[in-house]
Image: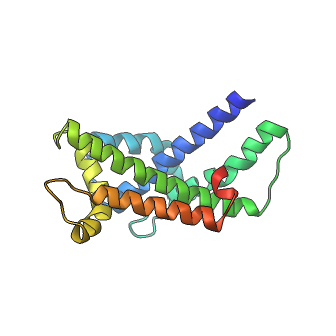
């Protein structure tokens, strides 16, 4: 049972991350013709394409992808409970758990994108097409911190500033929803 639980949880979490990445890429107007952007669109298009006919976009936000990500995070824990105990619990509290799980997934995605951008800056030094997408995604978050905290000695600490804000928000989630935040 633990193996099946791990596989289901991992697959749902990864697909939610890809959906959130698609939303983020559309919101930040990333280069659509970039190979990484094309990969994200091709992975999500079989499900999002038909949904977009029913659910239109709300401005720069891809509402079909957001709704699907919310539904997946809301159904994740009842499905895991069904696998582990054999009983299905459809509680209205699952909506709050789904929303919190979606917020935590978004924070995790931002964390990993900034960390990958920092590592890629050491390795490829901006020559990869993936670097350009990472810059387009993370620059709106890092630019305000860069205005407050300028580069010191050629080292950019704005990524660290964003990660510290994410840690602050994570601890705020732990304070506001003790016990529940750890399960997400």
Instruction: Determine the residue positioned at 34% across, 61% down.
Output: 161
Residue 54 in view, yes or no: no
Could you say where residue 173 lies in the image, as x and y percent from the top left? 58, 63
Q: Nearer the viewer, residue 86 or 159?
A: 159
Q: Position of residue 168 (x, y in %)?
A: 48, 64
Identity of the residue drawn at 52% across and 43% down: 15
User: Which is more toward the observer, 29 or 85?
Assistant: 85
Coordinates of residue 59 in the picture (x, y in percent): 40, 70
Q: Is residue 6 visible?
A: yes
The N terminus is located in which quarter? top right
Reply above or below: 135 against 172: above
At 45% from the left and 60% from the top, the residue drawn is 166
- How many numbered circles are shown? 0
Residue 181, by quadrant, is bottom right
| In the image: residue 82, left or right of residue 140 | right
* Residue drawn at x 17%, y 41% as measured from the top left: 125
Indicate left or right for 142 with 18 as reference.
left
Which sits in the foreground, 163 or 93? 163
User: Residue 79 falls in which quadrant of the image?
Assistant: top right
| Residue 90 spot, x, y in % from top left | 80, 55
């Amino acid at each position: 049972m633990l193996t099946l639980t791990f596989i289901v949880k991992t697959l749902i979490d990864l697909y939610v991350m890809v959906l959130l990445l698609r939303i983020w890429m559309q919101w930040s107007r990333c280069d659509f013709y970039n190979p990484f952007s094309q990969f994200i669109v091709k992975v999500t298009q079989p499900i999002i394409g038909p949904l977009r006919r029913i659910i239109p976009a709300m401005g720069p936000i891809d509402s079909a992808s957001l709704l699907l990500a919310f539904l997946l995070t809301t159904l994740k824990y009842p499905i895991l409970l069904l696998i582990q105990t054999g009983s299905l619990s459809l509680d209205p509290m699952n909506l709050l758990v789904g929303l919190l799980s979606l917020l935590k997934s978004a924070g995790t995605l931002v964390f990993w994108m900034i960390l990958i951008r920092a590592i890629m800056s050491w390795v490829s030094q901006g020559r990869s097409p993936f670097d350009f997408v990472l810059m387009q995604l993370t620059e709106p978050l890092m630019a305000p911190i860069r205005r407050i905290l300028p580069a010191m000695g050629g080292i950019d600490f704005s990524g660290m500033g964003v990660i510290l804000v994410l840690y602050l928000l994570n601890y705020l989630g732990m304070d506001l929803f003790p016990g529940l935040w750890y399960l997400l």
